[in-house]
Amino acid sequence: MKILSSVTLVACLFALLGCATTQNKRISQNEALFNTYTPTERKLIRMGEVAVGFDQDQVRMSLGDPSRETTVDTAAGKAIVWEYRELSPSLGLSVGGGIGTRGSGVGVGTGVGVSPNRTKLLKRIVFDRQTGEVSKVESYK
């Protein structure tokens, strides 16, 4: 049991380190541009946040590439929408049994699958098409 706990702990640490590395990597790849932003903008980007008025480079540095990009009609005209989604796993459980002439048996199986059609919307970033700046940020939990 201790081995399982240790393995789980190590896996969680690698996952957390991987996230931090990705955030820092996006910033370091665009360091010259990042340094031109205001201290408030830099702080928001480091925290993985987006504010109204950000341009696409700032959003990409903060959140990464969008899962989906679309164009929608709004009252003010057309707008570009970036969606950030996470895959939602599905869990299946089945139980089976059988009796034969030479004995009996029972089997239990589990499975976890990920379907690209089963996603959860996390954030929706709306850009004004004329200015290219964020006009609206929608967060979902």
Image (tube, rainbow, N blue to C red):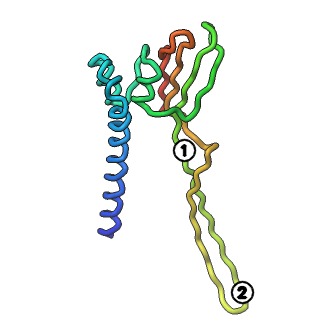
Q: Quadrant of residue 120?
A: top right
Viewer-proximal residue among 47 and 93: 47
Residue 95 located left or right of residue 24: right
Q: Helix, strand, or loop for circle 2? A: strand
Circle 1 crowding by C-alpha within 10 Å: few under 14, some 14–19, many from 20: few
Say which quadrant the N terminus sits in.
bottom left
Q: Position of residue 58 (x, y in %)?
A: 41, 23
Q: Is residue 66 left or right of residue 117?
A: left
Is residue 102 depicted above or below 19 in this figure?
Answer: below
Q: Give the farthest residue toward the top.
A: 76
| Callout count | 2
Residue 93 location, quadrant: bottom right
The residue that disc 1 covers is: 87
Near-viewer residue (17 or 2): 17
Q: Are marks 1 and 2 in contact (CB under 8 Å)?
A: no
Provide residue 99's location: percent of width, then percent of height: 70, 83
Which residue shows up at 58% across the image and 32% down it? 68
Which residue in the protein does label 2 denote? 100
Question: What's the amino acid at mark 2?
Answer: Gly
Q: Residue at x 58, y 71 (%)?
A: 108
